Image (cartoon, helix red, strand yellow):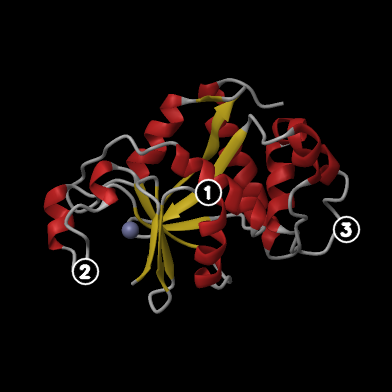
Amino acid sequence: MIRGHAGRSSTVSASLARNQLADGAMKTPAIYRRNLLFGGIAAACLNPLTGRAENTPASCTWPPPGWTEKGFPTRRWVKISFINTGERFENLYMEDGKYIMPEVQQFSWVCRDFRRSEWAWLNPLLMDFLFVLHWKYCKDEIKILSGYRSPETNAQIEGAALRSQHIWANALDIHLPDVDNAAVAEDFKKFIYGGVGMYPLKHFTHLDCGPLRNWVG
Ligand SMILES: [Zn+2]
């Protein structure tokens, strides 16, 4: 089992490198690769999936059997790439039901206002949304188009709401590869209390922790 904050990053990086090498030759379903990647960490809540990692088709069971038995996991991870910089975040951000604040901070930094190199603490509930999406759509990596935006940057973005939740570090614009993102938005409206914006022509979905509302952009 991988333990300890400082040591985890290098271990995960090494594991990632191995996984990337293996990707071309062996198309193991993404979520199951994740399961292997985190080994014992994932096993705590995902045991029912682990044994099928090598021979199960590329689909995930929803809800994951471990969740049905034990409830929403208290160990959670996300894996994202921020398309504007190419930077990635991949790590656990919650253990024993508590947010790991250095990881929330690192996630927030990756999803920063890259135009001004300014960051703000993102609402960690956004990470929980992503964690659910990883599983619900069987996706290994989620692309982030926008996270925190300073008021100055927000004012310069065409079509951005003046009081956008992005300026409160309360919103993400996301893209799930190879999935109808409009369908994701429709689906999301059913299980979050907040804002959901569909941008079907731009292939992304806006999620926020603000008041309940939805729109098509
Ligand atoms: Zn947005």
Mark 2 element type: loop
Question: What residue does disc 3 label?
Answer: 55
Q: Is residue 176 visible?
A: no
Seen from the viewer's position, the closer of residues 1 and 127 is 127
Nearer the camera: disc 1 or disc 3: 1
Structural crowding at the residue carrying mark 3, measured as other residues with C-alpha within 10 Å and reported as few (<14), some (14–19) or many (≥20): few
User: What is the x, y in percent for residue 92?
Assistant: 56, 34
> In the image, which disc is placed on residue 159?
2
Question: What residue does disc 1 label?
Answer: 130
Mark 1 element type: helix
Q: Does the CB distance between marks 1 and 3 fall below 8 Å? A: no
User: What is the x, y in percent for residue 94?
Assistant: 55, 29
Q: Is residue 64 visible?
A: yes
What is the C-alpha distance between the residues marked 1 and 3? 26 Å
* Quadrant, the C terminus: bottom left
> Which numbered disc flags the more N-terminal residue, 2 or 3?
3
Where residue 73 sits, quadrant-wise, is top right
User: Residue 181 vs residue 24: left or right?
Assistant: left
Q: Residue furthest front?
A: 212
Q: Residue furthest bottom?
A: 201
What is the C-alpha distance between the residues marked 2 and 1? 24 Å
What is the C-alpha distance between the residues marked 2 and 3? 46 Å
User: Residue 194 vs residue 176: left or right?
Assistant: left
Nearer the camera: disc 2 or disc 1: 2
